[in-house]
Image: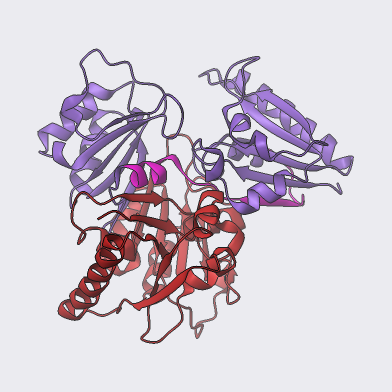
Chain colours: A purple, B red
């Protein structure tokens, strides 16, 4: 294999929140792979970085199913891995783009662990959604001797309750589907004044609640909904 | 106050790992405040972003003492806060730059909490050192249902041992001064094959150990030394 593969984090949503390195590299690619969550759907990662992609670049949007069906996922990943291997054998310069940072809760890791050893791979980090949320709400992620925990709310109520007790600074991702539980736990521990919620940070659909008490009971929040808690702020 | 204050993360060290937004903003500032760890010393954050700073910009390197003397620290912070307030009253466009991300273990937060409410402040996130370390070593920070803990090794051996037991993915910062303890704990839990160590990521002095067994006993590692542990990789 003689081509080179770049894994590039696109950041959370605004085109100018990618790194200068990512912008420069994207202008020079032969092929850009972009993951799409829906079949035939547009890739959000691609929409972020489209202004930087060169005229000569072939864009390959590929569907990565968000399903609990492991076999279906495996088949989709393997198909992309085989296609990337073929492009590398063909001496192409390839980027695989993904939202936020590519090494954190990212489609890229599913590809990386299925690629053979010995390929020429370079990873370019990206801004995470929670770094942007902290910036927008001006709430520190962690200070001095604080530890920071980043977790998904889908881990269940008990694990969430324990984390809220043990740690002084938390990023709780995917908070939409279990918002009632999250809010209840935060309230029980007297932390409502230390929490903020942001959905779709830097996208057109962005919503911010600096006070969780202000969220309407019937509010339908999107998949990318994050709660920050910092007990010392 | 009619000026505007930008807090800008410079990322971990390479000039092209700042965001496009940060690069664009830095070209337009009246004043850039840069923290220096030593008195009269050069600011590392400044050396990273110097290529982007406009000709018209006044650079103010200011000393933020790294000391346990709280009064000395407070005095230094207050002096900078007063200076920033004066520049804002003078209608200046000001940037305060800081290494990595400004909302995570950052000098900026010490300034932010001392500034009065109602100022026009915009925070621009930056790439953290551990995102770059994960990228360089191609080790995922967290996958799927994993939780990620970011903490300083200075919390003590007991807290470290507990975190290593409870969490499957960890970023252990400031690992140089207590490396023997960290290595012992990781070895005790059979995690030596899941850990990597990187110092001064993307600086000229960078060192990487993909296997903690390879670190010479007499190795002197610098302040910015981080260990990543991912039990599932």
Nearer-the-camera pick, B47 or B184: B47
Whether A75 is drawn above or below A105: the answer is: above
Residue B83 quadrant: bottom left
Residue B162 horizontal/vertical position (percent): 28, 55
- Is B50 placed left or right of A202 in the picture? right
- Camera-nearest residue between B117 and A123: B117
Q: Which residues are magenta?
A: A114-136
User: Residue A189: where, in percent of width, then height?
Assistant: 11, 38
Residue B178, can we see it? Answer: yes
Q: Residue at x 23, y 75 (%)?
A: B79
**Residue at the front extreme, as displayed:** B90
Residue A111 among magenta residues: no
Toward the top, the furthest residue is A218
Residue A116 magenta-drawn?
Answer: yes
Give the percent coordinates (x, y) of residue A91: 88, 44
A6 w.r.t. A68: above or below:
below
Image quadrant of residue B113?
bottom left
Q: Position of residue B46 (x, y in %)?
A: 48, 71
| A95 left or right, relative to A58 | left
**Could you tell me how many numbered marks the image carries?**
0
Query: Compared with residue A194, is residue B3 higher up or lower down, i.e. above or below?
Result: below
Q: Nearer the viewer, residue A11 or A136?
A: A136
Instruction: Please report the residue visible at 76 percent of the width from the left and 52 percent of the height from the top.
Output: A120
Residue A145 showing in the rendered view: no
Vertical side of A8 occupied by A214: above or below: above
Q: Nearer the viewer, residue B125 or A112?
A: B125
């Amino acid at each position: 294999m003689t081509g080179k593969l770049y894994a590039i984090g696109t950041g959370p949503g605004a085109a100018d929140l990618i790194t200068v390195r990512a912008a420069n590299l994207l202008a020079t690619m032969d092929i850009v792979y972009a993951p799409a969550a829906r079949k035939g759907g547009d890739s959000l990662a691609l929409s972020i970085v489209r202004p930087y992609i060169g005229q000569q670049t072939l864009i390959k949007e590929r569907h990565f199913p968000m399903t609990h069906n492991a076999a279906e996922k495996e088949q989709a990943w393997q198909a992309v891995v085989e296609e990337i291997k073929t492009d590398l054998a063909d001496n192409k310069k390839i980027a695989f783009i993904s939202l936020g940072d590519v090494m954190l809760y990212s489609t890229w890791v599913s590809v990386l662990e299925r690629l053979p050893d010995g390929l020429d791979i370079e990873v370019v980090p990206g801004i995470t959604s929670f770094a942007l949320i902290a910036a927008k709400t001006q709430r520190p992620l962690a200070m001095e001797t604080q530890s920071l925990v980043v977790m998904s709310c889908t881990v269940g109520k008990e694990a969430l309750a324990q984390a809220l007790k043990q740690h002084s600074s938390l990023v709780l991702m995917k908070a939409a589907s279990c918002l009632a539980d999250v809010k209840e736990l935060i309230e029980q521990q007297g932390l409502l004044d230390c929490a903020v919620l942001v959905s779709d940070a830097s996208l057109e659909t962005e919503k911010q609640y600096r006070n969780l008490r202000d969220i309407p009971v019937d509010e339908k929040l999107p998949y990318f909904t994050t709660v920050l808690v910092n007990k010392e702020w």
